[in-house]
Image (cartoon, coloured by chain):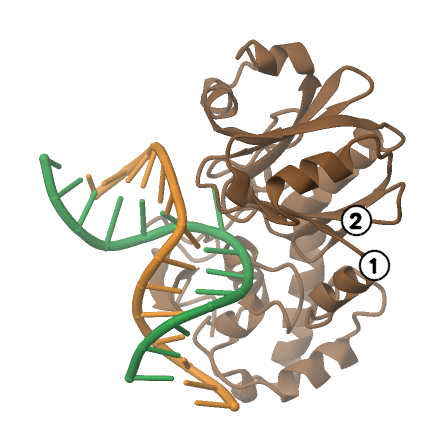
Chain colours: A brown, B green, C orange
Amino acid sequence: MPELPEVETIKNDLKEKVVGKTITGGWTDWPKMIKQPPAEQFLGEIKGLKITDVRRRAKNLIFYLSNELFMLAHLKMTGHFLIAPANLLKDNNWQSDDQYLSDRVNQFIHFALYLDTGEVLAFSDMRKFGWVKLLTEKELDETFACLGPEPLDKDFTLEKLKEILSKKRGAIKKILLEQDTIAGIGNIYGDEILYKAGILPFREVQSLSTEEIENLYKAIKEVLATAVKLRGTSTSDYRDTSGKKGIYGDIRKVYRRTGELCPECAMPVERQKIAGRSAHFCRVCQK
DNA sequence: TGCAGTGTTGCTTC
DNA sequence: CGAAGCAACACTGC
């Protein structure tokens, strides 16, 4: 679920809510979620550290800690970071008008950090694919070494995109999903970007014209920026750190709309597997 | 009821 | 070597 816009939203929330606060302890009931160092050691080491900053790279969250270490977190498919007064979670009584989320929160929190403010930073993850790691700066750099550019950064230019694509082969949808091409795009925004650019997902990247690459470039910037403004897509169980939904799903054109009519030409939206993932597209509006 | 499908990614296999 | 398949896990919807 969480792609660039969702992780960016969570990062912005966390920046306001946890920076400057001190971790008084940690807890887990699923030690596999703590990938490095081993869970017990991790929970010991993190105690007493202050969170000095929170940033995002690709779909990763990076918590800057006061001892020069970094807590790296990945939400994978169904992870949520939630902030609440500790007693709400301890009492299994998350206050939300969203029953779906409440159920998940009360059932699927598998990792938590207690803060000196009496709040808890909780990691809820139904499918348990998400993880955290404690890393040095060097390890962090190594982890990110193979990632492509951040698409919303100023230095991600049209020329840069042309250069990257010139070295790639295969279906454009597959290329967009590769994190070493451009960082942070997943299945939702991959489909929405290609719809906006008017390019069919199975088009060979080398067959794209200069004009098509220009349209793709504009679509990447516009779709992702709009999705950040709307705080992400919640067609499934993504929620922000307060448990609220993002509303990009309301304006999405093709993702998970198989059989519905294209808003431009009324052709039914089709679905096809590309690189093991569902691609949704309009055969008329995308060439 | 059962099975395919789900936002991710990295490991295994061919 | 690259590409495809699958595993990690739990739930939804057809």
**Residue at x-position 34% and y-position 65%:** A272
- Pick the residue in front: A209 or A184: A184
Report helix, strand or loop for mark 1.
helix
**Residue at x-position 59% and y-position 13%:** A90
**Residue at x-position 68% and y-position 81%:** A164
The disc label shown at residue A177, or none: none
Neighbourhood count class around disc 2 (C-alpha, 10 Å): few under 14, some 14–19, many 20 upward: many
Give the image quarter of residue A47. top right
**As drawn, A71 above or below A86:** below
**As drawn, A213 above or below A25:** below
Q: Please state the horizontal and vertical placement of residue C1, each as a whole percent of the image.
A: 52, 90
Q: Please state the horizontal and vertical placement of residue A205, each as a whole percent of the image.
A: 54, 83
> Which label's residue is closer to the chain start, 2 or 1?
2
**As drawn, C1 above or below A249:** below
Report helix, strand or loop for mark 2.
strand
Using the image, name the chain to which the residue with label 2 belongs.
Answer: A
C-beta proximity under 8 Å, tags 2 and 1: yes
Give the image quarter of residue A220. bottom right
The answer to whether residue A134 is left or right of residue A54 is left
Q: CA distance from mark 2 to mark 1?
A: 7 Å
- Pick the residue in front: A267 or A247: A247
Neighbourhood count class around disc 1 (C-alpha, 10 Å): few under 14, some 14–19, many 20 upward: few
Q: Please state the horizontal and vertical placement of residue A74, each as a whole percent of the image.
A: 62, 49
The answer to whether residue A246 is left or right of residue A17 is left
Q: Which residue does the numbered mark 1 point to in the structure image?
A: A137
Q: Which residue does the numbered mark 2 point to in the structure image?
A: A70
Q: What amino acid does circle 2 point to? A: Phe
Q: What amino acid does circle 1 point to? A: Glu
**Residue at x-position 82% and y-position 20%:** A116
Q: Please state the horizontal and vertical placement of residue A25, each as a whole percent of the image.
A: 73, 26
Q: Could you tell me if residue A259 is visible in this image?
A: yes
The answer to whether residue A169 is left or right of residue A222 is left
